[in-house]
Image: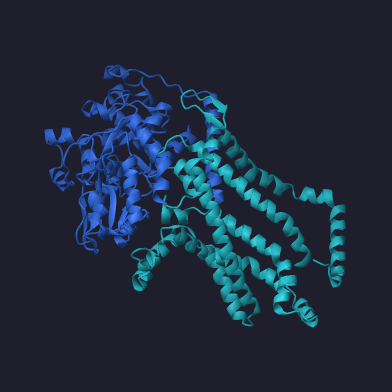
Amino acid sequence: MLSSTARRGAAVLLSAAVLTTLSACGAAPDPQQPGGAASGDAKGKTQPGAATSAADLGGMEALVAAAEKEGQLNVIALPPDWANYGEMVKAFQAKYPKIKVGGENPDATSADEIAAVKSRKGQKRAPDVLDLGIAFARSGAAENLFASYKVTAWDKIPGSQKDADARWYNDYGGYVSIGCDAARIPNCPQTFADLLKPEYKGKVALNGNPTKSGSAFGGVYAAALANKGSFADIQPGIDFFGQLRKSGNFIPVESTPATVEKGETPISIDWDYLNAGYAEQFKGKGVDWKVSVPSDGVYAQYYSQAINKDAPNPAAARLWMEFLYSAEGQNIWLKGHARPVLLPVMAADGTADKDAVTKLPQVQGTPSFPASTELDKAKATLAEKWDKALS
Amino acid sequence: MSAPTPTSPTRGTAGGTTLRRRRRGPRTWLAALPLLAFTGLCFGLPLGAIAFGAVTRTDPGTGATRVTGEHLARSLQGPYLDSLIGSVQLSALTALLGGVLGVLIAQALVTSRSTALRSAALTASGVLANFGGVPLAFAFIATAGISGVVTQLADLTDLGWDLYSFTGLAVVYLYFLTPLMVLVIVPALDGLRPQWREAAQNNGATGRQFWRHVGLPVLAPSLLGGFVLLFGTAFAAHATAAALVGGSVPLVTLKIADALSGNVLTGQENVALALGLDMILIAGLVMAVYLPLQRRSARWLR
């Protein structure tokens, strides 16, 4: 196990070494052609890797043709039971049978995704598209790892949820919610304040360690908001969990589908789409999973989508993006109880799957998002204080 | 310890081996070349890479690399220092307990006449010593977790039992450390010649005196070796702890994982490498105590 740490460290460094060597001997030409060229004369001129929109390649049909010619799409970190990604991949595969989707390491973290992009630069096995936590989308863009590409629906994505240069944009998200097994817990908690009640002793869990897991981090942020904290001040959230730990209510075991099914984590703070997924998954297995978005700590967070700048299958990567941001793709996320970024627009123009919308957990109030600097500050505080508060 | 005369012939042979070895020195060295190359490649290179990463920083924008002590300094401060201390405490405690338990079990096996018991226990130890990671963690969650079978039956929670704490983690670690100690120490106990005990008894020594003046001094290096091995195993364990306690028991391996691979903290890779370097240094220090003593044990247990 020591060796695995060492190996990881070595892998990071070796990849860094490889990276510098590769970039030294001739980086791939990357002419940033502005989009909007007439489809006729753009055809055959713009390489898929440089296309910043489908029009650059001569429209959707040309994009599909180019992608089918590549015949492969490498995805990474897409767990089939997360936000309905299993169906997403299947639907894409059914629509474009000539493109083989190669999924890699479904449980990878955002850091693993970035490491894969860096270490396999120039290789055929490198991931084409990435689904990243917002911090990694920002840092990856700063490191110039992503291609700039505007999907057809680009203009409909709210300005606060996309990079101005189209290197990343939010894909789907959800609210921090409290999942609760009503078969084991007589009164399910509805708010963060409820969680402090003695009746929940040894029952409350997070989806992982908040210094590592994005959803657990969201849980602490939401708890901060519920306890007079703010986006700039996450400390009340840390104190809240410290208090929960001292009273014995909080158990540090990471909630997974397995612990939920077994009843080890009868109350789990997690994204609402995961909790809602559990409700469906474990119906009839002795688990009556109820989901509520706590009214005192409303916190929403979105994941972001990006294309690897050196994608081995650049056209397939772009086609995947077009698929994700089509009404079809957005509705697949919606069916997985996640809130796709285009949901407000789709609800207005009637393309949203109404059934799926009614199944979303109810939320009071509107979400707001922390600024970059606030997020950084919150993370630094968390990394510094979390262990102390819990041990 | 006064040198017992009866063993001097043995020492003579040992001296002879050393002499012969010395004569064939250069050729032996050549034969070891593949091993040395392998070691250099598989240990030296990663070590160099870790050390390099721990003392440099690459600017993401410009790609320029410069030397800095900032990562090492950070790895020895605040929560990172706590995690190092936590790891050393947990490893030392579990290695000590596992060592004592392992020796007691091994001694029982060695003195028992039943070969069936002996081989069964050794096989079981071989399996259990390698039973770690997430499966072990989940086995404990299912039996001794908050809604675990044993916890419910015996009302352990009322007795103050908490699997997700330092104590809980120590118990889980003992589950694979004790069998490991048994495996390591049984050969050494076998090497304690019955004649030594008989000789001691003939000279009027009590059992306690035998252990105090003969048994333990001879075994000491092996015991210490076992302790070092257990310490190292516990120190490097990651998956079990990650599945069980998350952040509530500060451990350096968990901190490295958080910094290297996560969805929250960005740009912490170099601190993780610095922590890795700290771990290697601590392991090196422990080995430095063990190696000179191990040389002494070779004299007695052959």
Identified at 47% across, 58% down, the residue is B133
User: Percent position (x, y) of residue A183?
Assistant: 22, 63
As drawn, B32 above or below A368: below
- The foreground one among B80 and A351 is B80
User: Percent position (x, y) of residue A88?
Assistant: 28, 43
User: Is residue B265 shown to the viewer in this render?
Assistant: yes
Identified at 87% across, 69% down, the residue is B9
User: Percent position (x, y) of residue B223?
Assistant: 66, 64
User: Percent position (x, y) of residue B22?
Assistant: 85, 53
Q: Is residue A7 left or right of residue A220?
A: right
- The foreground one among A332 and B51 is B51
Question: In blue, which chain?
Answer: A
The quarter holding residue A97 reads top left
Number of marks drawn: 0
Query: What colouring does the structure picture have?
Result: by chain
- The foreground one among A341 and A193 is A193
Q: Is residue B26 left or right of residue A196?
A: right
Q: Is residue B158 left or right of residue A120?
A: left
- The foreground one among A231 and A89 is A231
The quarter holding residue B299 reads bottom right
As drawn, B148 above or below A136: below
As drawn, A162 above or below B227: above
Q: Colour of chain B?
A: cyan
User: Is residue A216 shown to the viewer in this render?
Assistant: no
